[in-house]
Structures are given as structure tokens and as C-alpha cells.
Image: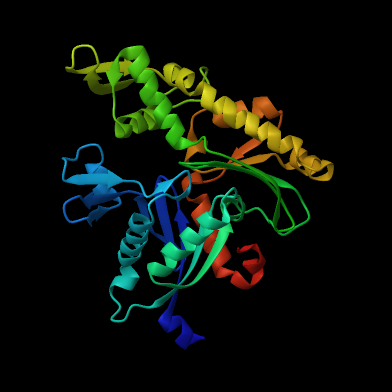
Amino acid sequence: MGLFNLFTQDIAIDLGTANTLIIHNDKVVVDAPSIVAIDRSTNTIIAVGHQARQMHGKTHENIKTIRPLKDGVIADFNASEHMIREMIKSIPSLKSRVFAPSLRMVICIPSGITEVEKRAVKDSAEHAGAKEVYLIHEPMAAAIGIGVDVLEPKGNMIIDIGGGTTEIAVLALGGIVCDKSIKVAGDVFTNDIAYYMRTQHNLFVGERTAELIKIEVGAAMDELPNPPDDYNVQGRDLLSGKPKQITVTYREIAKALDKSIMRIEDAIMEALSMTPPELAADIYNSGIYLAGGGSMLRGLDKRISMKTDLPVYIADDPLRAVVRGTGIALKNLDKFTFLMK
């Protein structure tokens, strides 16, 4: 076994629309935006992750930045393959090796993924150097990462709000009993904010600025116990064309995000209506667990709780719940193999 470990390295990957996280030796070694910068003239990749993110929205005609994943699945095969390869290369303990080790990977995927999309994820991983690839569904990984015992005969409801998709699933006995996957998540919230700025303030802001607004003053309700301070936003005035600054409040952002959050609430209610009665009784007692970056939106847990009349709990470090669960599944492959697709 020792010799096997010498030549084979295990890595767990949360391949997200917004961020990619990698666990190696029980530590998160990569946490970078899922974005690549490409030189149009030579078609080569010049930057990945944080460096490419800094270029996003600020490029000239010879450089383009693309996000290889859309709605949780691979949209650009070559770019995603390069991105995975570069991120694996940046793992400190693998950099120092003389020989490239063979890799065993567990990658998490959205629950509503098709067979073709699964194949694309596997192919990308294999081209990036993986000898063995296992896939695990995001809600299952999130549940394991939160600390839920997914193997016991008890119903648990997990909502994972990522960048591209919101995954809602009821789990029991190591399987997904019913699930709902909708393409309303962090990216849609960002677009809602940019649209609101354009229509209400005549201010044209980029994707990065809209995301900053979401982080600084994003809210799901217009009454919060600890409201954030008002936030100054800079952009281009659509009427005069000049750069200008305005101040926005969390109440405005709550108004901008209201319709999208209603769609998530409707999907949760739909998933609850499909839940078998015995599992519904378990969920009544245990409540709903929230994971993913979108769950950090101020007041979202309270709003979902008011809609469902159930207690709602946010995971500790919700951004890393999915990758933590993927890492635990990788460490206990013999126990969780049947969960892998």
C-alpha cells in the first residue's frame, strides 16, 4: 500500500461554476475562481484562476477571459481541461515531485447532470492526468461535508446554492430520494444586480462590480437585524457616458433579488411536495441544511424558514462544505463507492 501511495495521489475536486476547490492530503490546497484567460492570436492559455480573474472585464482585443463551466457543467472542453491541469500543477506537494504521480480523483457534479455532461467531466479529468475518476453528486457531497450521516435510514434535506445551480435534494440510506436542480444561483443574483443598477440608477456596472455589491450589501429580506452599511458603487453613467458613483442600500439589493429568490423558494416547495411522508416527518424534526456560497446571502435562511415553516441551518464555512464532503468520500472510498457514479 505504501508503494501504491508513492505513485498514486488522491485529490478531491469541487469543479464549480464560480470557484474550483481542490483537497489533497486532507487540506484545501487550491481555492481559485473558475476562469481562464486566452491569447486570441495564438489560442494559448495565459492565466488561470486569480490572475485570470483580475483580467476579467479589463481585456483588450487580443485577450479574452472565459469561464469554462456554465450552470455547473462544462461549456468549454479545452479550457476546462487546461484549467484543471494548471490547478493540479499548482498543488505545492505535487510541484516538488520528479515524476508526475498518477492521480485518483473524486469530482462532484450537479444532481441534474446528463450522461453526456458526466462524460465531459470524466474526459476532462482523464486528459488532465487522472487514472481513476469517481463522480459524486453535489448535494450528497455537501451533506457529508456538513457532517450528516447520509447512510442512516433518516431523511435529510440539503440545499446547495452554488454559482450556476441550486441543488435541492432529500437524502436517505446513501441515496437521493428526490431532487430538484434549477439554474438560479449566484450568477443569476449577480446579473439581477447589474440589471437593477442599469434600470434604476442608469449605471452600467461590470460582472465583478455586481458581485462585489452582492457580497457587501446582498440581502434576501428588506428587514435585517444587523444590516450592512450602505455601499458606494462606481460605474459608467448610461446617459452622459461619464464615470460616476452612487450609494446603494441592502434594501435595494433585496428588491433586485426578490424574483430569483422566489424561484428558489418555489423549487424547495416542489421538492418538499415530492418527499415521501416518512421522510417528510424526519425533515420536520431535523430541518433544512444550507450550503454553497449563495447560502451566505443575508437573511436567506430566515426567508426560507418563513416559507417552509421549518428550521434552516447554514453549514459552517458553506463555501467549502461540498469540497470537504468530496474529500471525506475520497478518504473513505470503500464506504462510499456505491455513491460514486
Residue at the right extreme, as displayed: 278
Above or below for 99 versus 288? below
Q: What x and y, as percent, mark residue 163?
A: 45, 41
Nearest the viewer among 315 and 46 is: 46
Above or below for 303 versus 327? above
Q: What x and y, as percent, mark residue 79?
A: 33, 55
Could you tell me if residue 302 is visible in this image? no
Above or below for 326 versus 93? above
Q: Tell me the quadrant of the picture where the C terminus can be found.
A: bottom right
The tally of labels here is: 0
Q: What x and y, as percent, mark residue 53?
A: 28, 45
Left or right, residue 220 beside residue 51: right
Left or right, residue 51 beside residue 224: left
**Colouring convention used in this rendered image of the protein:** rainbow
| Residue at the image point whose x is 31% and y is 34% from the top | 208
Could you tell me if residue 245 is visible in this image? yes
Q: What x and y, as percent, mark residue 304?
A: 62, 29
